[in-house]
Amino acid sequence: MAAPKWVTLRSQWLGQQLRELREANDLILKEVGEYLQRDPATVSRFESGGYPIRRPDLLALLDLYGVADGRRREELMKLSQEVWQKSWWDGYAGEVAGAFIDYVWLESRARKILTFDNTLLPGLLHTSAYARAAIVAAEYGARRDQIDRWVELRMSRQEILGGDDPPHFSAIIDEAVLRREVGGRKCLVAQLRHLVECVFRSSVEIRVLPFAAGAHASPTGAFRIFTMREPFPEVGYAETPKGAIYVESPDADGFARTYDELQKLALTPEKSAELISVTAEELSR
């Protein structure tokens, strides 16, 4: 099997845990390769995530490494299945960057998502019209059919908020975002009214960072924090002109501290909902 073009986070995480187990048992790649009857280079690729490990090999390694705890074995086996399994978002893999497929996977597996935005609303809260306008502006060279697929992907991502076990989604939004006329004034008003409706979801919290807050802790812009279910680490995410970056804890702690500082300056959810409603009414006149 050829190595995938993009080494996914889930593949990297599985490989990292396999490497830690091997090292904890004081084994070298050659010894593990001999046990599996595989080349040491193949074992190395298992650990780097570049060559997804098959179930029989993983079971053999868990036995070799003495992993007897049933829950730990189940977690690793499940992660191995997710490395191989095709999910709905993988259907878009040929149309978006590999890093963004990781992003959608993180959204789908997180138990808590924290976001800060100062230019656009977070994608999980977009209306279809707002999403299309935002994507058209950012992907100005894209074809119509590509835009359609990206809008479809963005709207499909929102299904996690309406599931049986939704993540807690907490968004801090700069007040300027409420007045940026993405798609025109009519589009923005409809989006703001949708935002007010989202406030009443039990798993959603929306806070506005008002103009009156002045300078704040994230002058460089938007970011996300994904708090994952065990055994995954917390992940910080930010976009740059050179592409997206993912930072795992403990290095992601800086994202959490920044979010805490922003939250201190933000309005309460109740006052935020009031401000959003007032802004929508003002813009609709």
Image (tube, grey):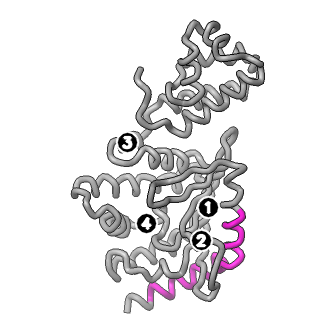
Magenta-tinted stretch: 257-281
Which residue is at 74% across, 20% downward?
67
- Which tag, 4 or 2, sits closer to the chain's start? 4
Quarter-of-image position of residue 26: top right
- Which tag, 3 or 2, sits closer to the chain's start? 3
Quarter in which the N terminus is drawn: top left
Point out the frontmost of discs 4 and 2: 2
Give the Cα separation between the discs numbered 4 and 3: 21 Å
Q: How many neighbours does mark 3 have within 10 angstroms: few (below 14), some (14-19), or many (20 or more)?
A: some
Amino acid marked by disc 1: Leu
Give the Cα separation between the discs numbered 4 and 2: 15 Å
- Which tag, 2 or 1, sits closer to the chain's start? 1
- Which tag, 4 or 1, sits closer to the chain's start? 1
Give the Cα separation between the discs numbered 4 and 1: 16 Å
Quarter in which the C terminus is drawn: bottom left
Q: Nearer the viewer, residue 139 or 189?
A: 139
Instruction: Judge from the rendering whether residue 80 lies leftward or rightward of residue 139; answer left or right.
Output: right
Which dot marks residue 126? 4
Q: Which residue is mark 1?
A: 114
Q: Which residue is mark 2?
A: 172
Q: Are marks 4 and 3 in contact (CB under 8 Å)?
A: no
Give the Cα separation between the discs numbered 1 and 3: 25 Å
